[in-house]
Image: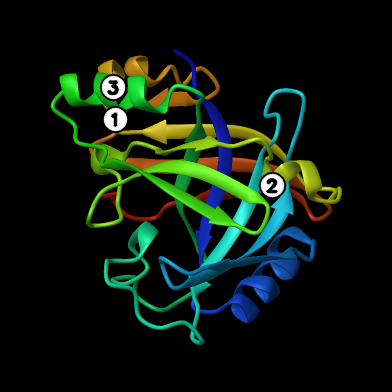
């Protein structure tokens, strides 16, 4: 089985803060995404696709102040996030074999959560989600898209995903997922690092804390 890097998740205090950060850091204005009713969040999106990372994009996500508080923890640790500058918090990987990937991780004593069917407008997808909204062991969140993919409708941004690095994760787990696009590094703590080529030059983003 093989998974592909799908999108980078940047958590922000608000979408206005996230937009300002994106313009200041990357030199690009993201486009409006939409709302996630189940999670009480909303997002901005930006195209990152390249020949190596096809259908890749960046998502800036924040708690939607107009939405009621969800009955479950929000994804990507937004409920426990300390307010501050927008930060890379997760990489999401896609596959057309979500159930097989879940089975493989369960055999490695990793519970990635249940497949949850979600939709927003014309988009539909399944995602493995645990009750705590996190992915254990620093692994990528896993998604399986329906007929349409968000990157197909995103305009060119002038920004491209150059590299993705994952530190501090057991190689046996990444082998189960088939993360061939991701460079692995030894580390005491799980963390993500990505490199983008943007109008303001090469930009490196890091998850500056251990991933649950």
Residue 115 pos. (x, y %):
34, 40
Q: Are marks 1 and 2 in contact (CB under 8 Å)?
A: no
Which one is closest to the eye, mark 3 or mark 2? Answer: 2
Q: Is residue 209 above or below residue 115?
A: below
At x 63% / y 66%, what residue is drawn? 34
Q: Position of residue 192 (x, y in %)?
A: 43, 42
Q: CA distance from mark 1 to mark 3?
A: 7 Å
What's the CA distance linking mark 3 and mark 2?
27 Å
In the figure, residue 19 lies in which quadrant?
A: bottom right
Residue 173 image label: 3
Residue 95 appears left or right of 71 = right
Q: Is the C-beta separation of discs 1 and 3 under 8 Å?
A: yes
Q: Where, quadrant-wise, is the N terminus in this rendering?
A: top left
Disc 2 residue crowd, few under 14, some 14–19, many 20+, Cα 10 Å: some
Q: Residue extending furthest bottom?
A: 66
Q: Badge 2 is on which residue? A: 150
* Residue assigned mark 1: 169
Q: Nearer the viewer, mark 1 or mark 2?
A: 2
Q: Residue at x 35, y 80 (%)?
A: 69
The residue lying toward the viewer, choosing from 22 and 120, is: 120
Closer to the chain start, of discs 1 and 2, is 2
Q: Earlier in the sequence, mark 3 or mark 2?
A: 2
Q: Quadrant of residue 54?
A: top right
C-alpha distance separating marks 1 and 2 = 28 Å
Residue toward you, 67 or 74: 67
Whole-percent x and y of residue 171?
30, 18
Where's residue 9, x and y in %? 52, 53
Is 116 placed left or right of 105 in the picture? right
């Amino acid at each position: 089985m093989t998974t592909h890097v799908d999108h980078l998740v940047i958590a922000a205090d608000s979408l206005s803060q996230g937009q300002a950060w994106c313009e200041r850091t990357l030199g690009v204005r993201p486009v409006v995404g939409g709302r996630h009713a189940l999670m009480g969040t909303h997002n901005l999106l930006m195209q990152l696709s390249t020949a190596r990372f096809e259908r890749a994009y960046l998502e800036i996500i924040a708690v939607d102040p107009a939405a009621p508080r969800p009955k479950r923890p929000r994804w990507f640790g937004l409920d426990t996030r300390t307010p501050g500058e927008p930060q890379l918090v997760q990489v999401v990987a896609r596959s057309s074999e979500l159930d097989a990937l879940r089975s493989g991780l369960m055999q490695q004593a990793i519970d990635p959560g249940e497949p949850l069917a979600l939709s927003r407008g014309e988009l539909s997808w399944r995602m493995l989600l645990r009750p705590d909204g996190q992915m254990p062991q620093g692994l990528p969140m896993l998604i399986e898209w329906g007929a349409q993919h968000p990157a197909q409708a995103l305009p060119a941004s002038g920004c491209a995903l150059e590299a993705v690095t994952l530190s501090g994760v057991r190689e046996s787990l990444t082998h189960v997922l088939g993360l061939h696009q991701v460079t692995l590094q030894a580390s005491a703590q799980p963390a993500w690092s990505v490199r983008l080529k943007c109008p303001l030059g090469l930009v490196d983003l890091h998850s500056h804390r251990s991933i649950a």
